Amino acid sequence: MTLKVALQMDPIGLVKINADSTFRIAIEAQARGHSLFYYPPDRLAFVEGRVLARGWPIELRREVGNHVSYGEETEVDLGDYDVVWLRQDPPFDMGYITTTHILDLIHPKTLVVNDPFWVRNCPEKLLVLQFPDLIPPTAIARDLATIRAFKAKHGDIILKPLYGNGGAGVFRLDPNDRNLSSLFELFTSMSREPLIVQKFLPDVAKGDKRVILIDGEPVGAINRVPLAGETRSNMHVGGRPEKIGLTSRDLEICAAIGPTLREKGQIFVGIDVIGDYLTEINVTSPTGIQELERFDGTNTAERIWQVIEAKRAAVA
């Protein structure tokens, strides 16, 4: 089976080819005989009943500084494609959300990965609320009194933007901290969105585990260890990836959320687990598959394409 594959992503010429998950997925597709077309999100358009994208056919290679060749720029009808990857990075703002509405118009005839309707309705820090027994004590509010009461109850908390990503804007406020009001004023002056607060989990010092699920099934995990003196473990802010296995608790969490992910068409998902707690379910642009492949030899990209090819074959 050969598929026509379109990649909606941030500039492909700038990716770090030994870390970027989209690059790994795309180069695996190319190795399997699928053709690739790349376009940035701002080149997606709805025009008179058609979903169009302006971009380039591409060929990839694993050569640092010389990893992509572009064909002639052209406009294509995404309704003629077999697969579209929704892979631009957050922020999960109205621009991002609008692309999901447009891609809704061609899915599932064209398979959009992940399903854009449920990407839009399952933000990373909100989908976890459907599993209250799996998550740490959590509150979502824009009301300072509510957040103060939560801090008074739990003492040591994490405060962060509800739609943030990559560890940006994440603050730990311990029992002696006096900055809650100032941070609240800062966040609310910049955005109309609520904030999320969670009880601080000391186990984060041992790492924030990224577990990869494909079509609701766990395939492996990497551990992300924060720098000394740092609360955040995200690799964007210097977290160190290391080899780790799946615990019985990890498998319990995956068994609980897997059917929901599968039902909602979330083929490639990365969840975050600290100690015994699920903290996020990342469906927009999860990462970690290249690190997992280096540590365990697990070819997650191959597993992803096996699932996609089976779904395409079922409707052929």
Image (cartoon, grey):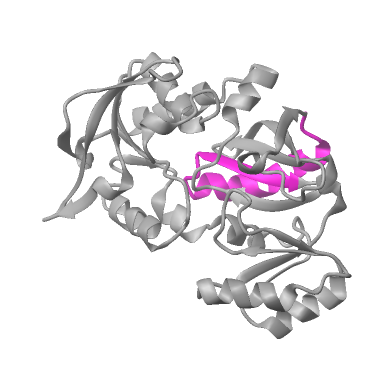
Q: Quadrant of residue 82?
A: top left
Find residue 61 and report its horizontal and vertical position in percent.
40, 15
Q: Quadrant of the N terminus?
A: top left
Q: Quadrant of residue 216?
A: top right
Find residue 76 and report its horizontal and vertical position in percent.
17, 37
Q: Is residue 82 above or below residue 151?
A: above
At x 72% / y 85%, what residue is drawn?
A: 145
Observer-nearest residue: 103 or 163?
A: 163
Which segment did they paint magenta? 245-273
The reply to whether residue 275 is visible in this rendering is: no
Observer-nearest residue: 158 or 296?
A: 158
133 within the magenta span:
no
Lateral position of residue 277 relative to residue 91, left or right: right
Find residue 224 and report its horizontal and vertical position in percent.
72, 37
Observer-nearest residue: 98 or 134?
A: 98
Q: Is residue 228 above or below residue 245?
A: below
At x 81% / y 47%, what residue is drawn?
A: 229
Q: Is residue 33 above or below residue 281?
A: above
